[in-house]
Amino acid sequence: MRVDDRLATALQNIDASSEPARIGQWRQLIDILAQNPRDFAGELVAKGLVNAHALGRTLDVNERLAGVHALAGRIRSAPLVQLLAGDVPAIAAAAIFGADLSDTEWSELVPELPVRARGFLRSRSDLGQKTRLALSNWSGADFRIAGTIAPTVETAIPEIAPSGEIGAIVRRIEQWRKDREAGDSPRLPLGDDFVDSELAPPSEISFETDDNGTIIWVDDVPRGAVVGVDIARAAYDDGPGPDAYGAAAFRQRMPLENARMRLRGSPLVDGDWRVNAAPFFDPLTGRFRGYRGIMRRPRLYEKPEAGAAGEEWRRQRGEGMQQVVHELRTPLGAIAGFAEIIEQQLFGPVTEEYRQMAGAILSDAQRLLAGFEDLSVASRLDAGNFEVEPGVTDCRWLANRLAERLESVSDENRIVLNLAIADPVRAFAIDRALAERIFSRFLSAVMMGCEEGESLNGRFKTEPGVSTCNLFQLELPAKLKQCSDDQLFGTDPSFNEFETSADTSSPLLGLGFSLRLVRNLARKAGGDLRFQKESLVLAIPAVQDGDMDFRDIGGD
């Protein structure tokens, strides 16, 4: 007969002398406990849980979360689920969604779970009848109104219902009181079944998270289906959570704009949403506190099931803009060609006056063509048919190329352009043409706000992590430092000081359009552009396994 003595061996070799040892011991314990819950003696399991709890308290939350994620779908121990459910919300959610327990085991575990963990459990779509009944019996405790045990009609009504539903709520509360006095199960008559059948589905959900990304407050919706959802981790399988873009934006403390979100549980909120949210910080200490924002239901053309209509609408709009650009670009190209012929005297000598006029026409035509190209790219992005070609761009090459390309602009306006590369830095995970387009548009747009003789300082550096990216931090010129995010990106209609410029070297369509185009291109490539105090930070994915052996360089 084969005896499984792994747990006993692991408990005999506990080594807490160093952090790597503690991490290894903790992962080994929860892995063994998760897979063989019935093959060990009860006292060994209890000792293993005690040791796992003690070791876990000494580890960073990210280490614990990584260990639980590694067990996704393999946690078959109810005692281990109970232990992990008492951890921080992110770990509790990962344990609940990663557990593989029977209907009986879940139902027996429900009374032992913290309130927040029961909320996570309600979001699972594979619960059996016993578990749903157990959760239903605990809804009275979990969805208590304003902290009261026996809410009065006067306190309950304003919190949950429009005026047209008051009568139904009064009758249900009175029936609940009678049931409790008769000794029946104290179930609050405002559980998910009542909410689903009596309240109108919301079109928007206001929410707030803590600094770990866990939603801790929502407005006017069933809390059990939303509170406790983690926006810092991408949704796993069919569970609740954001898409990869939303999770990456949270990690980098960037605003979420139309990020995809999925909720599970109550039919009122179950399904797909779009999230717009922004980080907020403590006004005294500057410490990151979390995110505040709004979830909304997808518009018709954003819904997967209405994909044909939405895609057709976007395609037609993009094709219309492409046609307009083509009709403008064709004659303008001819004008530019004739102007170049005159300027270079290809058909014979001309006076200096005509050459100067032709040179001015050629310069204007080239600027218009560049603007039309930006419009074409923007329309392709909007229509969803802009493809990012795979490739690698060396950071040193890009910095030198930008310095060469923008040399005439900086010299003409007497602007000192300083580009530095931190040591070490990885290559960009995009092709050269796209990298040059993004950064040249970015720098030329910001140059619009530079005064004569001013310096424009930018710095490349690599930010390691799960998804390594390169950051380019560009200090704003003095004229732009007092601008808000909305003013810089052209979404403030009352602000237009830098939207137009007579300078022929500046972007034709203005600062706001150019920065929005750069941001959309960056997002298409998996990065982003964000405003940070008195700088703009452009994030672009870096190669995941590239060498990081470049030294600092600078250039004027």
Image (spheres, helix red, strand yellow):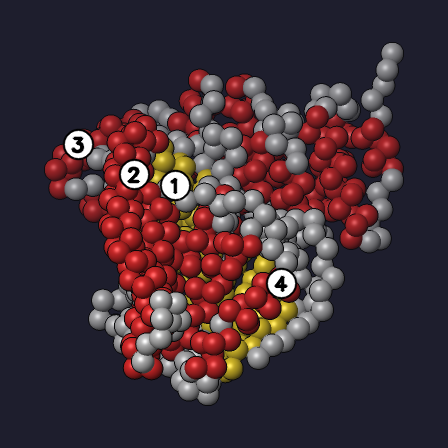
Residue located beneath label 3 in the image = 168
Could you say which quadrant of the image residue 50 lies in? top right
Residue located beneath label 2 in the image = 315
In 3D space, how far apart are the residues under numbered discs 1 and 3 (Cα atoms)?
Answer: 51 Å
Are the residues at dot 3 and dot 2 in contact (C-beta closer than 8 Å)?
no
Secondary structure found at label 4: helix
Is residue 291 visible in this depiction of the protein? no
Please name the residue shown 31% across and 35% down the image.
311
In 3D space, how far apart are the residues under numbered discs 1 and 2 (Cα atoms)?
Answer: 8 Å
In the picture, which quadrant includes the N terminus? top right
Are the residues at dot 1 and dot 2 in contact (C-beta closer than 8 Å)?
yes
Within 10 angstroms of label 4, few (less than 14), some, or many (20 or more) residues?
few
Please name the residue shown 67% across and 40% down the image.
67
Residue 422 sits above or below residue 223 on the image: below
* Label at residue 229: none
Are the residues at dot 3 and dot 4 in contact (C-beta closer than 8 Å)?
no
Going from N to C along the chain, the mark reached first, 1 or 2, is 2
Secondary structure found at label 2: helix
